[in-house]
Structure formats: C-alpha cells, structure tokens
Image (tube, rainbow, N blue to C red):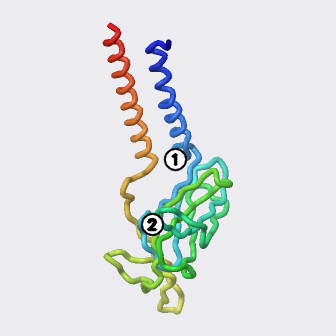
Amino acid sequence: MMSHRLRAAVAGVPIVLLSTLLLASPALAADALRITSPVAGSSVSGPLTVEGEVAASRPLDVDLSLAPQVLGDCGAPAVTSRAADVDGAFSASIPTAGLADGTYCLIAVADDGRLSTVLADITVNNEITPGEEVDGFQLSTEALGGAGGGTGASAAPLVASPLLGDLPIVGSAVLALTMALAGVVLGTGLWARRRSAA
C-alpha cells in the first residue's frame, strides 16, 4: 500500500512535466519568430507587407505564406514569399492580387520548421479600391502616381493592438496561475489526508 506522501508526489509529476514542456516551448525559448505587422483581423488590398522579428544565434531564411482559412483551420499555402538571411527584424511583401477575396492564415516558418508562427483572420479584399477608407482604416495601396509620374510608397498595413496582448506573456501568466492552483489543490489534499488519519 502506497503512503499518502508517495501518492502526493506521484500526483505532482504531471504538473511538473506539463510545466517543463510549456517552459521549453518556442514562445518562451531564446530562439523565437514573431510577426509584428499586420495583426490578426486585418484587412488588406494589394501587396501585404509583413514585418516581424527573429531571435536566433545566426541569420535565417523566413518563409511567409498565405493559406486559405476555413472554419478556423489553415489550408495549403496559396502564395509564398521569402525573407533571406534575417538577423533580427525583417520585412517582406506577399502579392495578394491573384488571390480570391476571403480569410487567410499568415504563416511564417524558419530554420527548417523549428521556428514558426501563424496569424489567423487576415482578410484579403481586392475589390475595394486601393487607398479607400473602410470604417476609419486606411487600406494599403499598390502604388499611387506622383506628380512627376513616379510611384509613391505603399501605405502600411492596418495596425491595431492584439486583443490578448503579447501571447508569451499571457502564456506565462496562465502557467503561473495553473501551477499555483495545482499547489493549493495538492496542499489541501495532503491536509485533508493528515486530518483523516489523525
């Protein structure tokens, strides 16, 4: 028959394993890949400018793609682009003119798939006239003719703060709360067992 202390220790093993796995996840690792612009829920027309950061010990190629999003799942990439030899911040453009209007996932992959991130709910709407304001947001433009016949720079994609903030911080907070709750449950169980044994 197992002692109550041994049972308590065995009950804590899954919590320790889960905590270790979460702390070793790419979101909290030293090497990380993050998209800073656009944000989830953005609407774009024309070329989509993607900006982000790579924290790695060496320069990496970052493959960016747009994949159709159906019922929350991302399909196969429909169009891709690459940012080569990225060491820190990067910026790349993905052409959307050949894509059907709809909702897409923006997928970034680096280091042969070891680093990756997905941004959902990117809406491509090429039927809107480039430069037109929609609900107070300025959509990016392909090119504007200047007075000298040249082309102007593309407007930046929509920028809004994410609903949940920075996900690695939220994940760390949830992990800390889960571990605290597990400790309270474990302590309560040990106290109740001691009390019943007495």
Residue to which mark 2 is pinned: 121
- Front one among 13 and 59: 13
* Disc 1 target residue: 27
In this rendering, would 53 be left or right of 121?
right
Q: Position of residue 173 (x, y in %)?
A: 39, 41
The dot on residue 35 is: none
Q: Please state the horizontal and vertical placement of residue 64, each as a whole percent of the image.
A: 59, 65
Residue drawn at (51%, 62%) of the image:
73
- Label 1 element class: loop
Q: Secondary structure at mark 2?
A: strand
Q: Amino acid at mark 1?
A: Ala
Question: Image height check: is 82 above or below 124?
Answer: above
Q: Would residue 16 be seen by someone viewing this image from the given angle? A: yes
- Furthest residue to the top? 198
Quadrant where the C terminus sits is: top left
Of tags 2 and 1, which is closer to the observer? Answer: 2
| Occupied quadrant, residue 97 | bottom right
Which class describes the residues within 10 Å of circle 1: few (<14), some (14-19), or many (20+)?
Answer: many
> For residue 60, which quarter of the picture?
bottom right
Q: Is residue 14 above or below residue 109?
A: above
Q: Position of residue 114 (x, y in %)?
A: 63, 50
Residue lying at 54% horizontally and 77% vertically, measured from the top left: 96
The amino acid type found where label 2 is placed reads Asp
Evaluate whether residue 156 shows in this view: no
In the rendering, at what x and y percent does residue 2 appear? 49, 14
Residue 65 drawn above or below residue 178: below
Q: CA distance from mark 2 to mark 1?
A: 20 Å
The residue at 40%/46% (across/down) is: 170
| Badge 2: residue crowd in 10 Å (few <14, some 14–19, many ≥20) | some
Q: Would you say the residues marked 2 and 1 are in contact, meaning their CB atoms lie under 8 Å apart? A: no
Mark 2 or mark 1: whose residue is earlier in sequence: 1
